[in-house]
Amino acid sequence: MATVNIICRDSDFGLARCQRILAAVAARAGHTVTLSRPERDRSVPQYLRNLYRALASRLQPPSNPDYDINIFIEDLDPGWFSKARQNDLIPNQEWFHYRWLPYLFGIDRVLAKTRRAQTIFATLGCPTNFISFTSEDRFDPSQPKDYSRFFHLAGNSPYKGTDTLLKLWQQHPEWPQLVVIQSAKQAKPLSAANICYQVGHIDDHQLQVEQNRCGIHLCLSETEGFGHYIVEAMSCQALVVTTDAAPMNELITEERGLLVAVAQSQRQGLDQRHFVDSHALETCIQTIIAMDDAQKQTLGTQAREWYLANQRRFETRLQWALGQPISQIEERRAFLPMQNV
């Protein structure tokens, strides 16, 4: 079995979830797991030093490294490259900095959570394997599900389409109740009888209660590396609505949810940021209101079935990837022009 070092920042809730999930799957497969933190290049001298480290790790592989495999989640820190025989990256393409592109020379393999990420990094010349990913199972069958109750988990992110959703809902006082949970940092003044606006911290148990009681989850992500809150909604057997753009529409299809068309997009890291069309969203909400509970429940059931099947596939793919023989990749990567991404 391999010694695996998972390198991830501790300042982001989504990244922390990724690290916990990876560590658990690797440990179940019998690998020895270590958790580490990267150091960001916050100065020009540090950046130049990291460029040298990335090049040196490829030209002179370590003779007695501490680990068999380093797995970097999102951030790349070349200071760790020489500490493992193999360096893998699980990227969030929307947060990948252009200055990190030369660091990819020291990466042996990209493990992609989405087909979108697989395409982007393969285009850059990186050896890439699609592994998918998973999220925590939030399903609580003891909670009665109300398929007339809408839910939006904005949290601390400004990338969830919250402003568009709230503006639209305030224009429709006849619509059912919408439960919104948002951090105080992102919250804005709001007054609407059919919006239950919960601002600030909510404990995990109460959050899980809301996730399960609300039958409709509006997950209008503008960009995602994977989409944990979308997949958590699917695990709850909810009817999930999300943005019709990758990678969100890799998770939700017409067989297991509803998609909302995009009005415009703009560059975000190596990917795009997509803004849903408010008229398309309005039509989608009206469609849901007109649906009977049986139709909604069918889509929710199929979403949970996908969640369970994907979880099994992810574990199989990750265990396969970690079990591959450690080998040096002789062929150098050629970075293609960014307009091809």
Image (cartoon, rainbow, N blue to C red):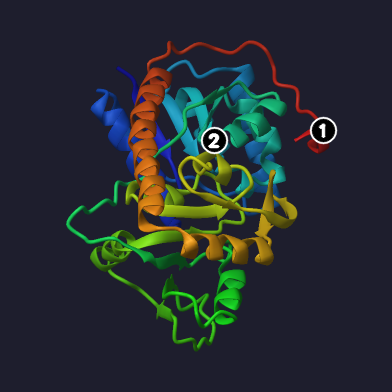
Residue 199 quadrant: bottom left
Q: CA distance from mark 1 to mark 2?
A: 22 Å
- What residue is disc 1 on? 337
- What residue is disc 2 on? 114
Rendering coords of residue 221 (x, y %): 56, 56
**Secondary structure type for disc 1:** loop
Q: Is residue 186 above or below residue 339?
A: below
For the point 56% across and 49% down, the residue is 224
Q: Note whether residue 66 is visible.
A: no
Q: Which residue is nearer to you in this view: 148 or 125?
A: 148
Q: Which dot, 1 or 2, sits closer to the camera?
A: 2
Q: Is residue 268 above or below residue 33?
A: below
Instruction: Report the amino acid beneath label 2.
Output: Thr
For the point 58% across and 27% down, the residue is 107
- Residue 216 is marked as none
Instruction: Report the amino acid beneath label 1.
Output: Pro
Tell me the quadrant of the picture where the N terminus can be found.
Answer: top left
Q: Residue furthest left?
A: 142
For the point 65% across and 34% down, the residue is 103
Q: Is residue 182 above or below residue 62?
A: below
Q: Residues within 10 Å of mark 1 (few under 14, many from 20)?
A: few
Q: Which residue is nearer to you in this view: 44 or 217?
A: 217
Q: Note whether residue 259 is visible.
A: yes
Q: Is residue 171 above or below residue 224?
A: below
